[in-house]
Amino acid sequence: MSSKEKFLIIAPSWIGDLIISQSLIKYLKKEYLDCQIDIIVRPELVKLAKMMPEVQNIYSLDIEHKELGLIKRHILAKEIKKYSYSTSIILPNSFKSAIIPWLANVPLRVGYNRELRLFLLNKKYSLIKHKDSMVNRYLKLADGSYSDSIRPSLVINRDLADSIGRKYLINNSKKNIVLCPEAEYGSAKRWPTNKWVQLANFYKEKNYNVYLLGKNKNLDIKYNSVLKKDSVISLLGKTSLEEATYLLSLVDLVITNDSGLMHITASVNTNLISIFGSSSPFYTPPLMKDQFGEVVYKALKCSPCFKRECPLQHLNCLNHISAEEILNKSIKYLS
């Protein structure tokens, strides 16, 4: 590869995976100083991708998760073909994710040999699922490996962040804590509701501001008991992803399940405690500097199972994590 490569990255569909992929993008920029890196993402992730300064152009592909969308892919491939990309790195493992670079005649099409897409790729890697961390799995496609110098780091517009903070009443006269109780993947990644309520009550007793953040406003009903208290504010379903990102950059501490908001928090250098259940902190850890937080994970014999629902129906990997344990771990970030 020459130093003036033009890379087209087919981005992952999940928020957290997109954040992790910034390490690959940074690696390419470091190895090929004059290269151009463009990216294809889902529409709802465009503003997040814009916070990655290494990315020059962003293409939005509006196709549902299970939709093949051949017509839309053909139209975008025709547009992309004009720009003569030299290399495309395809991060998702699906057959359909490799179609656009193939239709656009990108000379080098790199990805993992999955879903019978052998003929769509001309540089193929074998994949043993969960053997490597996700970040190194992505970096392997460029023959790289992870280091702190390529840690994900979204660029925050401080004026916009302050404006969004005022909009959602972030009050710096007290410590501000964000609780993120969601995990879209499934219930086996979600710390139980009663423990979030306990934790919010602990912080309320210490006179901290507590915010619930996520996209599902229907969760409010589960937190009614704690939301009636002063200084506990629900932002569930009230913010855009961009606004949520800016809010996470403003507060003193974020506590999350293994989720997209966990990875965003790590990328904006906010103190973070992340709770892992069925997933593995060795596979998708928050890529943060140690001083900004830690992972809570019980490593039971049955975990990680990587299942959406607990196959043993006890959810001990999360039930064995108490609100008191999280409170005790958080104190050093709030002093």
Image: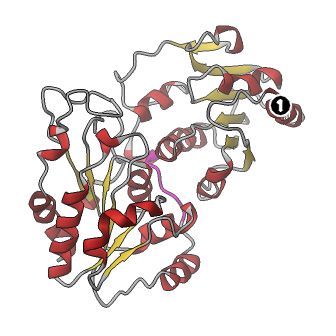
Please state which of residues 262 and 125 is positioned toward the viewer in this rendering: 262
**At 11% across and 45% down in the image, what residue appears?**
320
Q: Is residue 328 left or right of residue 170?
A: left
Q: Counting other residues with Cα less than 10 Å from the Cα at mark 1, is it few (<14), some (14-19), or many (20 or more)? A: some
Res 24 visible = yes
**SS assignment for the magenta stretch, majority:** loop
Identity, as a three-letter code, of the amino acid under mark 1: Ala
Question: Residue, x 15% and y 81% (percent of image)?
Answer: 206
Residue 168 percent coordinates (x, y): 48, 81
Q: Work out whether residue 42 or residue 319 is closer to the camera in this orientation and state it.
A: 319
Q: Is residue 125 magenta?
A: no
Rendered image quadrant of residue 67: top right
Q: Position of residue 180 (x, y in %)?
A: 35, 60
* Highlighted range, magenta: 150-155
* Quarter of the image that includes the C terminus: bottom left
Left or right, 199 with reference to 145: left
Q: Nearer the viewer, residue 322 or 94?
A: 322
Residue in view at x 57 percent, y 72 percent: 157
Q: Is residue 123 above or below residue 178?
A: above
SS type, badge 1: helix
Q: Is residue 253 visible?
A: no
Taking 265 as reference, is 105 above or below it? above
Circle 1 residue: 77
